[in-house]
Image: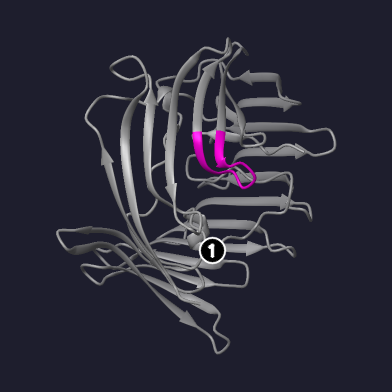
Amino acid sequence: MRKLLCVLPSLLFLVTFSASAQEERHTDARQDGLLGPVRSVHAIETRLPGKWQQPGGLGLMSPVRCRDCTYDPDGTKTSSGQIVNGEFHGNLTELRRDGNGNVTDRVVTEAITGKVIRHEVMGPYGKTAETDFDTTTGNVGWQQTFAYDQFGYMQDWLSLDGDGKQESHVVTSRLKDGTVTQQSVWGKNGQLSYQQTYDPEREITRFTVWAESGEMNLTYTYAHGKVISFWERPGLPHERPQFGEDFSDSGDKVNITNYHCHENGQCDLFHVHREYLDPAKKRNPTTIELRDSSDTLIGAAYIEYELDSFGNWLHRKVYVYPSEQGDRALREEDSRTITYWEK
C-alpha cells in the first residue's frame, strides 16, 4: 500500500501519515533521530562560506535538530535551545507525574525569563490538551485539544484562538494497521478547507481544496504512481503556488516523486532518490539527489558520518551539488557531543 500524499506546503497541518503499517510511537529522543538512552546533546553546526540554494525549495539538507537538548531516562525532552556565551537560551520542560510515574503534565518555560510558554496535558497516547501563552501579556494565545481512536492514533485535533474561537479542526480516520483513509480539515468559519481520501484496496488518493466561500478551488485524483486528473478553478492568483498544486508521493522513502501541477492540468515531475547508512531503518541519508523528468541531476547533497556505539552520528560532512565551482563541494561540517544515562 502507498502513503497518503504529502501536500506542499503543509501550512499549519501535518498531512503526511503512514498508509502501509502501524506507526511506531517514538519518544522525543527518537523523534530527534537519536538512539539509545540519550541524556544530553550538544551540537556545533559549521556552515562554510559560499552561496548554495536548495533547488525548488525542496529539503535536500537535514538541519541539526537539537543544538543543546536534554532528555529524561524515558526519552522525554526536558530542555531545548542553544548555549550562547555560556548562557542557555531556549525552553525548559517540567514533567509532572502521577503515582505510577506516568507523565500527566508538561509545563514549558523560557529559560531566561522563567515565563510559562506552554502547558500540555498528557494521556496514554500523547497530549490531550495544550495551552500556549503570550509571554508579553501572559494571556492565552492558542488552545488545542487532541483525541485518539481505539488503536491509539490521533483522530481529532481542534485548534482555538485565545478567545476560544475555532482556528482549525482536523479529523482523521484510520484502519487498525494505521492506514489513513480520510483526513478532513475545517477552517475558522467552520467551512471545509480541504479533504484527502485514500482507498487502500484500489490505491487511489483524492484531494480537494475549497475557498472560504465554499467554491471548489482545486481537485485531483492520483493512483498507482500517476496523476489521473487535475483541475483548478480558473483565475486563481498565482503570486505563489496555490495550496494543493505541489504534492509528493514518498513511496518507500528511497524514491520520492514530487509533482507541481498547473491550471491547464499538466504536471511537472521531479524525482528524489535517497540512500541511507542504515537502509533498514531509513536513518542517516548518505545521498539525496533531485532529478527532473528527463533524469537530469538538478541538485544533491552527499553526507559522510562518524558514529558512536549507539549508532548516533558524532561528526558529519555535507557536500552539495552544484557548487560555485560547478562540482560538488563541502557545504557544512557538524559535530555532536552526546552523553547517555547509565543503565
Secondary element type, mark 1:
loop
Q: Quadrant of residue 93?
A: bottom left
Q: State whether residue 284 appears in this view.
A: yes
Q: Position of residue 31 (x, y in %)?
A: 51, 56
Q: Position of residue 339 (x, y in %)?
A: 38, 66
Q: Quadrant of the N terminus?
A: top right
Going by the image, does 190 lie left or right of 314?
right
Q: Residue furthest left?
A: 85
Q: Which residues are magenta?
A: 275-286
**Amino acid bearing label 1:** Thr
Q: Quadrant of residue 136?
A: bottom left
Q: Position of residue 207 (x, y in %)?
A: 66, 32
Residue drawn where x is 69% and y is 39% of the image: 3
Eyeballing the image, is 138 above or below 196? below
Toward the viewer: 136 or 7?
7
Eyeballing the image, is 205 above or below 305? above
Label tally: 1
Going by the image, does 16 lie left or right of 113?
right
Q: Quadrant of residue 223?
A: top right
The residue that mark 1 highlights is: 27
Residue drawn where x is 54% and y is 67% of the image: 127
Residue drawn where x is 61% and y is 41% of the image: 279
